[in-house]
Image (cartoon, rainbow, N blue to C red):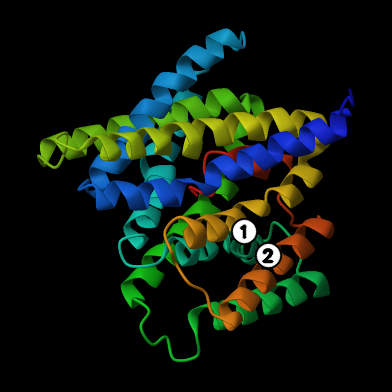
């Protein structure tokens, strides 16, 4: 029997995380097809995920106690930051293929780099310039020269999601300095759940009369698309470190594209396939030159998605 090293176990756990996060867009698509609306999907996703995360803290002997000030910050991040990002991402899936929405969301490392330069946190260098150029070229191929047949509102929603996520990461770097990442994730998820639940109930938009496949899809968004992704991420991060985790995590959009083709029957042109490779290449370039890269603090904040995300 071959025993895996800690590095191999860590890599497998991060791949499991990427696989979990990659299913989020697929399950959201299935939820829409079953008759759920955006607010129902997000309310149930974060509610069910929170029901899993709080017991996990106790199981892992992690104290949820934090200062009131930190709790308020985390709740605002969940309600306004991660909640808004998730809302725009889910909305984009009503107008775009799952593969395209995921790829547009995954431009966030590039946006983080640009914003960090603009606010003076980091210096711009040629590696970042090359990565940005490659990313823009990749998006040009993915979206097409004329944007014919692609929903402009869908593109706007997806890029808005990526931009909000980038701001969320930069803000979270400061908030999470003295808080365990899984504790922070639990508060963020719970705040998002409460916010969506209040608004959805107040506007009478909660749809509970869904067929079995609809409920299974909603459960999938919470378990595979959220909890499995988060746990695999943290477990892998502890074994192989932030830099390796960030590189392996770029498997997420690739897996989403593959699942979209295999399960949803989406099609890709050769140019779109090339564009996807270029965007992923630009992200990897940023990670190898880990000056912007998503460092450990960035990664712990980013783990509240993948994709979804």
Q: Which mark is on residue 254? A: 1
**Closer to the camera in the image, 300 or 275:** 275
Q: Quadrant of the N terminus?
A: top right
Residue 80 visible in the shown view: yes
Q: Residue 303 in the image: x percent, y percent? A: 59, 39
Q: Secondary structure at mark 2?
A: helix
Q: Secondary structure at mark 1?
A: helix
For this orientation, the residue located farthest to the bottom is: 146
- Answer with the quarter of the image where residue 232 lies: top right
Within 10 Å of disc 2 (Cα), the crowding (few <14, some 14-19, many 20+) is many
Q: CA distance from mark 1 to mark 2?
A: 8 Å
Q: Is residue 106 above or below residue 308?
A: below
Q: Is residue 235 above or below residue 112?
A: above
Q: Residue 46 in the image: x percent, y percent? A: 37, 33
Q: Residue at x 9, y 39 (%)?
A: 204
**Closer to the camera in the image, 122 or 42:** 42
Q: Is residue 269 left or right of residue 178?
A: left
Q: Is residue 92 left or right of residue 233?
A: left
- Answer with the quarter of the image where residue 95 lies: bottom left
Q: Residue at x 32, y 57 (%)?
A: 91
Q: Which mark is on residue 166? A: none
Residues tagged 1 and 2 counted as in contact (Cβ below 8 A): yes
**Closer to the camera in the image, 270 or 78:** 270
Q: Residue at x 80, y 37 (%)?
A: 241
Residue indicated by mark 2: 280
Residue 302 visible in the shown view: no
């Amino acid at each position: 029997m071959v025993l895996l090293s800690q590095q191999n176990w860590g890599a497998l756990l991060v791949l499991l995380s990427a696989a979990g996060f990659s299913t989020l867009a697929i399950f959201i698509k299935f939820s829409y097809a079953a008759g759920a609306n955006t607010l129902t999907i997000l309310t149930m996703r974060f509610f069910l995920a929170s029901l899993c995360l709080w017991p996990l803290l106790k199981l892992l002997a992690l104290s949820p106690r934090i200062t009131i000030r930190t709790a308020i910050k985390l709740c605002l991040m969940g309600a306004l930051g991660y909640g808004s990002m998730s809302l725009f991402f889910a909305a984009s899936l009503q107008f775009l293929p799952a593969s395209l929405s995921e790829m547009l969301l995954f431009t966030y490392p590039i946006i983080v780099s640009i914003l960090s330069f603009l606010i003076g946190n980091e210096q711009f260098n040629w590696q970042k310039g090359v990565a940005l150029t490659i990313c823009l070229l990749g998006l040009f191929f993915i979206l097409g020269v004329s944007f014919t047949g692609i929903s402009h509102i869908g593109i706007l929603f997806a890029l808005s999601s990526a931009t909000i996520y980038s701001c969320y990461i930069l803000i979270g770097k400061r908030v999470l300095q003295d808080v365990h990442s899984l504790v922070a994730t639990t508060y963020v998820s719970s705040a998002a759940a409460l916010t969506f639940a209040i608004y959805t109930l107040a506007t009478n938009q909660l749809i509970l009369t869904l067929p079995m496949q609809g409920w299974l899809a909603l459960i999938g968004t919470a378990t595979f698309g959220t909890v499995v992704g988060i746990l695999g991420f943290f477990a892998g991060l502890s074994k192989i470190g932030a830099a390796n985790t960030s590189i392996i995590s770029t498997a997420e959009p690739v897996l989403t594209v593959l699942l979209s083709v295999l399960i949803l029957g989406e099609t890709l042109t050769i140019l779109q396939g090339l564009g996807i490779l270029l965007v992923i290449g630009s992200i990897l370039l940023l990670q190898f030159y880990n000056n912007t890269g998503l460092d450990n603090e960035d990664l712990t904040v980013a783990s509240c998605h993948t994709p979804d995300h």
